[in-house]
Image (spheres, rainbow, N blue to C red):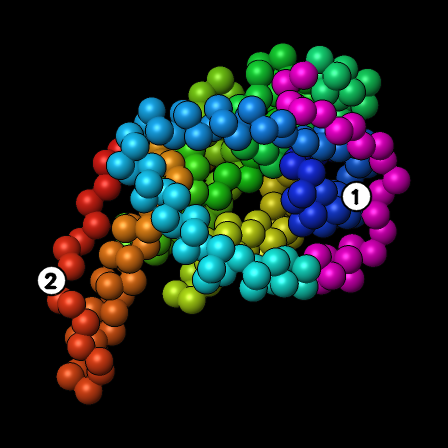
């Protein structure tokens, strides 16, 4: 089986770690590396403001500021450690070409993938792929979506499952891309227990990195024609967006209240008036 990868330039766990992993069980054909221009970030910001409004977008910015202060440095160290672990597990890095593009939907990216002729592509990117790109491999293009679908489609499903107290649905969905947003056929769910102290970024990496053997087996079954899509008919479906600081605070308060109730009054008292987090289906 020939495979290829689409990922972002700064995502070393994908650009090197997953390349090594893919090369351990397939013929790795090449990587489309996305170097996004500044205007793409501005477009993403504009879309989020339209989705949630200015007031909620300030909540998004507040969470990002909190993340930088509370987790960013430790997460960078954690990612370096994980990359070293992957280098040990998969010592051979395939000598396959990379193409750096501003968009995975560019004519250059499409030409590169057609020339490399992969049977299957893994897309690790924030950009929705055009049909003429995701249909190039005859086995399909697959995403490792950080969220259980269809309940947690679009962005940051692991964060929102935790924020909702839906701890049994903190995980990743392996699905084949179609024309919708995380609506394609599902070929696996891979869940983790999320530690209360870890960031949403670490959780989103763990749902992939802790299941590489099982994901490999699923991809091999797809190539062999023995994999059957999981029926998700009748399940609730919702799309989510960027994390909110208010959602994170309510989640921590709710967990603190549960810990206080379980341990008794010897714990430090917390505000027991915090209500359950009610989030719209965005």
Label 1 with label 2: CB-CB less than 8 Å: no
Which residue is rendered at x = 68% and y = 59% of the image? 80
Say whether residue 87 is left or right of residue 185: right
Q: Is residue 125 above or below residue 90?
A: above
Q: Residues within 10 Å of mark 2 (few under 14, many from 20)?
A: few
Q: Is residue 59 above or below residue 30?
A: below
Say whether residue 244 is left or right of residue 73: left
Disc 2 designates what residue? Answer: 273
Image quarter in which the N terminus is found: top right
Which residue is rendered at x = 64% and y = 52% of the image? 213
Work out whether residue 100 or residue 234 is closer to the camera in this orientation and state it. 100
Q: Work out which residue is located at the far left of the displayed protein and give it.
A: 273
Q: What stretch of residues is rendered in magenta?
A: 83-106
Q: Is residue 139 above or below residue 167?
A: above
Say whether residue 32 is left or right of residue 180: right
Can residue 71 be seen here? The reply is yes
Residue 135 in the image, given as x and y percentages of width and height: 63, 17
Work out whether residue 14 or residue 219 is closer to the camera in this orientation and state it. 14
Which residue is rendered at x = 19% and y = 87% of the image? 266
Disc 1 designates what residue? Answer: 23
Q: Does residue 77 belong to the magenta stretch?
A: no
Q: CA distance from mark 1 to mark 2?
A: 53 Å
């Amino acid at each position: 089986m020939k495979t290829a990868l689409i990922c972002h330039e700064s995502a070393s766990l994908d650009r090197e770690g997953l390349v090594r992993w893919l090369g351990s069980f397939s013929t790795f054909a090449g990587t489309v590396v996305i170097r996004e221009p500044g205007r793409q970030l501005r477009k993403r910001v504009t879309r989020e403001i339209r989705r949630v409004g200015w007031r909620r977008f300030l909540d998004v910015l507040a969470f990002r500021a909190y993340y930088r202060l509370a987790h960013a440095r430790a997460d960078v160290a954690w990612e370096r450690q994980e990359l070293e672990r992957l280098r040990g597990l998969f010592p051979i890095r395939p000598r396959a070409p990379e193409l750096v593009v501003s968009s995975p939907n560019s004519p250059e990216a499409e030409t590169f993938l057609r020339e490399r002729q992969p049977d299957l592509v893994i897309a690790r990117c924030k950009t929705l792929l055009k049909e003429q790109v995701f249909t190039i491999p005859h086995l399909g293009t697959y995403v490792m979506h950080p969220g259980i679908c269809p309940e947690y489609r679009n962005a940051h499903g692991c964060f929102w499952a935790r924020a909702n107290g839906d701890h049994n649905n903190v995980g990743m969905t392996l699905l084949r891309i179609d024309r919708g947003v995380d609506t394609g056929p599902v070929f696996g769910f891979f869940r983790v227990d999320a530690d209360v102290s870890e960031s949403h970024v670490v959780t989103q990496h763990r749902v992939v990195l802790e299941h590489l053997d099982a994901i490999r087996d699923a991809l091999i079954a797809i190539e062999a024609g023995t994999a059957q899509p999981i029926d998700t008919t009748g399940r609730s479906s919702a799309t989510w967006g960027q994390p909110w600081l208010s959602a994170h605070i309510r989640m921590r308060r709710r967990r603190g209240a549960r810990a206080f109730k379980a341990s008794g009054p010897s714990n430090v008292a917390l505000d027991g008036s915090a209500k359950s987090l009610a989030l719209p289906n965005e």
